[in-house]
Amino acid sequence: MIVVAGEALIDLVPDGPGGDAGLPALLPRRGGGPYNTAVALGRLGTPAAFCSRVSADTFGEALLDGLRAAEVDVSLVQRGPEPTTLAVTEIGADGSAGYGFYAGGTADRLFELPAALPDTARALCLGTCSLVLEPGASAYEALLRREARRGVLTLLDPNIRPGLIPDAAAYRARFRSWLPDVTLLKVSEEDARWLDGSVEQWLAAGPAAVVVTRGAEGLTVHTRQGAVYAVPAERVAVVDTIGAGDTVNAALLHRLAARDALSRAGLAALDEAGWGDVLRFAARAAAVTCSRRGAEPPHAAELG
């Protein structure tokens, strides 16, 4: 089982151009980086569980329905009466997405450290808003450290949302403090620039590998052994990029599991052919997500 921990929220996505007042209609879509990753894993056929705190409101019920439809285990989900976090999405001319968040007093911020994860858990994936918004961020951080120290592979996707980070320097320092407990770090080029560090520095701090997503230029992995492997992006007509990075997380974990490489030793043993297979699969999966509106990751049958 792969456990994904973090927020589940509702994306309000523009439905076409603005109306008479210049304001587009907004359609509610299930979302949140960790949520999208969990759904993508389930659709790919990988046993997955979601670990979070979800509202008991109508949006929260819809989020749980989406997880169940993807056959994701929801037994680790905590519930609360607080409202669901909302993210208002703006789509650029190139399909890129920007976000404004309404997260004050919402359910996912009140996540508490759960008891030990199931013995079947082989990997833990975390990131995005859940590692920023307190008090839940400290609980997710504690989960990362605890599971890493009992040998679970950890994937961190910081998925930076600058508008949610009041003190950039403090967050960057906190990010660096996580790295000794991170097995696989995945960052976008934009994240890497914002974090103001280098892949070499991050690898020296702990991860076995760093995967950098480069949008239309593809994906690159840097390994602790000093190897660098890259693959091009799959060409597709981009509708929007919502959920593309989350799909990459799921596809990486899915393919690594298929290669029995969900461990530091497993990552270290991958050669150029092995990493090429993993990265090409992730590029293909992300391309499908980019080809349709909202975070709609592919099912296994769509990837051949």
Image (cartoon, helix red, strand yellow):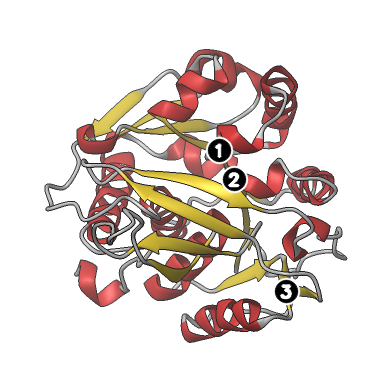
- Seen at 18% across and 37% down, the residue is 232
Q: Quadrant of the N terminus?
A: bottom right
Quick check: marks 1 and 2 in contact, CB under 8 Å? yes
**Marks 3 and 1, Cα distance to the nearest angstrom?**
22 Å
Name which of mark 3 and mark 1 comes first in the sequence. Answer: 3
Name which of mark 2 and mark 3 comes first in the sequence. Answer: 3
Label 2 sits on what residue type?
Answer: Thr
Element type at marker 2? Answer: helix
- Seen at 63% across and 63% down, the residue is 3
In the current view of this chain or complex, which residue is farthest to the front?
Answer: 20
Residue 270, numbered circle: none
Where does the image place residue 251, in percent across and percent down from the top left?
Answer: 39, 56
Q: Which residue is mark 1?
A: 161
- Residue 231 quadrant: top left
Label 1 sits on what residue type?
Answer: Arg
Camera-nearest residue between 12 and 40: 12
Element type at marker 3? Answer: strand
Camera-nearest residue between 237 and 203: 237
